[in-house]
Amino acid sequence: MKKIITLALLFTIGLTNAQAFKGAGDTKLNIGMTVQNGGTGILVSSDYGLGENFSIGALASYLLSGSGISAVSSDYRLDVKARFNANLGNVLNVSPKFDVYPGLNLGLKNFGGHVGAKYFFSEGFGVFTEFSTPFAKYDKDAISKYNNGSSFNIGASFNL
């Protein structure tokens, strides 16, 4: 019983100390799954806080499966994007463990926007979800629409 109480206490302390976005110098690493236009894949992104409410970062995604993906060149499976986020967690003041961030991204396939949310269970670990959509596509006549359309991302977030 003592072990259970001790673990519960440590878990509670970890939850109370968690913070989704701390501002300048804060670095987050996200690893997850992406679902887009009939395909699924993996993604890795990182955001670095430049100020109290904004961050910049990069995202790389690679599609692993989808309908007819074997006929798709690997050029259309990989996408890399630069990102800018407006972190609104402390503005909304819901919880210091929760952050909402709209933003813009500039990638190899398109220019677009995204909106996401992160929730941290402890100082170093949380979850994220994000929806991204293109505003302008560079190659409208591409054979594949993979990585050139809307996507839904979900995964784990780590505080570095």
Image (cartoon, grey):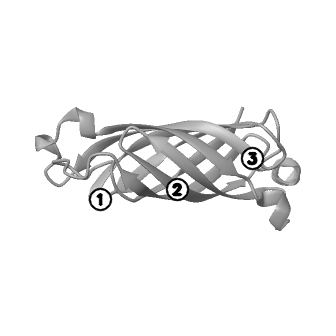
Q: Residue at x 17, y 46 (%)?
A: 69
Q: Which residue is mark 2?
A: 113
Q: Check the image and report above or below for 117 versus 49.
A: below
Report how far apart the C-alphas of labels 3 and 1 lie in the structure: 29 Å
Q: Which residue is mark 3?
A: 54
Q: Residue at x 42, y 56 (%)?
A: 134
Q: Please tell me in which quadrant of the rendered image residue 67 appears.
A: bottom left
Three-letter code, disc 1: Asn
Report how far apart the C-alphas of labels 3 and 2 lie in the structure: 15 Å
SS for dot 3? strand
Q: Which residue is mark 1?
A: 37
SS for dot 1? loop
Q: Please name whichever residue, 72 or 14, is drawn nearer the observer in this view of the structure.
A: 72
Report how far apart the C-alphas of labels 1 and 2 lie in the structure: 16 Å
Q: Is residue 70 left or right of residue 19?
A: left
Q: Dot 3 surroundings within 10 Å: few (below 14), some, or many (20 or more)?
A: many
Task: Indicate which label's residue lies in the foreground, 1 or 2.
Answer: 2
